[in-house]
Image (cartoon, rainbow, N blue to C red):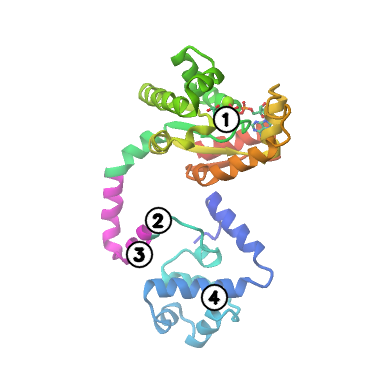
Amino acid sequence: MSLEPTTESQQEELQAADQSADGNILPTLGKRVREIRDRRGMTRKLVAREAGVSERHLAHLEGGDGNVSIVLLHNIARALNVPLIELLAPETEDTVEKRLIRRFLERLPQHRLEEVVFRLMRDFGHEEAVRRKRIALIGLRGAGKSTLGKRLAQEENMPFVELDREIEKETGIPGREIFSLYGQSGYRRIEKRTLERVLRDNPRAVISVGGGVVSQPESFEMLLSQCMTVWVKAQPEEHMARVMAQGDLRPMAGNDEAMEDLKRILEARLPLYAKADTVLDTSGETVDQSFIKLRQLVLG
Ligand SMILES: Nc1ncnc2c1ncn2[C@@H]1O[C@H](COP(=O)(O)OP(=O)(O)OP(=O)(O)O)[C@@H](O)[C@H]1O
Ligand SMILES: O=C(O)C1=C[C@@H](O)[C@@H](O)[C@H](O)C1
Ligand SMILES: [Mg+2]
């Protein structure tokens, strides 16, 4: 069995576990073993027997003061039927749905899992493959959606669609004027209509979507369900500096509170942007570095 973390999230979990290693590792490990054992409904006696450790040793481990060899830990993980890494990593904040699904699967006997895989593939496999052919980049202004999206589309020979430009084409007026003529809600209405058309016309594309799309639930739901979404983010100061470097001095012109506004908007949108399939943090990185990460995230 390989002990290497295979996915980025596993690597992050291990790093987090590493950071908590300053004295916390044994209590954390003990708590995880106990939690998983309880979740499985297994007695300590049973786990100890299946893992080939004494009950006393296991009790010490669960109490946070028993050091344990990697081989024994491996045996305990096997007895609990979880990958070793799950014992070492702090539990991530899963959604209720993910927890329910996991619990459901844990209770199914091994011989029925093949059927579950088959049904999932049948019911969702195709849809999911289709969804992943459209890559939508979301995030605040200056995140790098257009810069990185255009390059990804070029390299992968896919159409590149800039939703804000499509809205301008659809209405025949610049975005800023749409805002002053129709207001925020008018803009979002047109955006929704335009997004429907773009998705219909482009089964395969890279789409850069204006940062405000998350405030229109129907549009955002459409994006999440029909595209592989990437939240492109940076530090607030970088968003601001990048927008200004592009020659748009409006954010700062006579407005000392611009930075505060930006932080507030980012904070308010965080839970929404966080619904994206994946996150690309461009903080402190060059365009080239972020592009390599993006390609890895979406193409694997
Ligand atoms: N790591 C990075 N990744 C992406 N862009 C970066 C990075 N570092 C600096 N930049 C610069 O930041 C700017 C990002 O602008 P871009 O127009 O791509 O953002 P955007 O997310 O499309 O914004 P908007 O919502 O206004 O359309 C570019 O000028 C780019 O060169
Ligand atoms: O972040 C935002 O609120 C916006 C970003 C732009 O791309 C446009 O979608 C619009 O100007 C709103
Ligand atoms: Mg852009």
The tag on residue 287 is none
Q: Is mark 4 within 8 Å of ligand 1?
A: no
Nearer to us of marks 3 and 2 is 2
Question: What's the amino acid at mark 4?
Answer: Gly
Mark 2 to mark 1: distance in Å? Answer: 29 Å
Question: What's the amino acid at mark 3?
Answer: Glu
Mark 1 to mark 4: distance in Å? Answer: 43 Å
Question: What's the amino acid at mark 2?
Answer: Lys
Q: Is residue 192 magenta?
A: no
**Predominant secondary structure, magenta span:** helix
The tag on residue 145 is 1
User: In this orientation, which residue lies closer to the viewer: 260 or 199?
Assistant: 260
Mark 3 to mark 4: distance in Å? Answer: 20 Å
Of callouts 1 and 4, the N-terminal one:
4
Let me know if residue 70 appears in the view: no
State whether residue 162 is above or below residue 260. Answer: above
Of callouts 2 and 1, the N-terminal one:
2
Callout 1: few (<14), some (14-19), or many (20+) C-alpha neighbours within 10 Å?
Answer: many
Q: Is mark 1 within 8 Å of ligand 1?
A: yes
The tag on residue 106 is 3
Q: Is mark 2 within 8 Å of ligand 2?
A: no
Magenta region, residue range: 100-122
Mark 4 to mark 2: distance in Å? Answer: 23 Å
Which residue corresponds to mark 4? Answer: 30
Which residue corresponds to mark 2? Answer: 98
Mark 1 to mark 3: distance in Å? Answer: 39 Å
Please state the horizontal and vertical placement of residue 265, each as a whole percent of the image: 59, 40
Of callouts 4 and 2, the N-terminal one:
4
Say what secondary structure mark 2 lies in.
helix
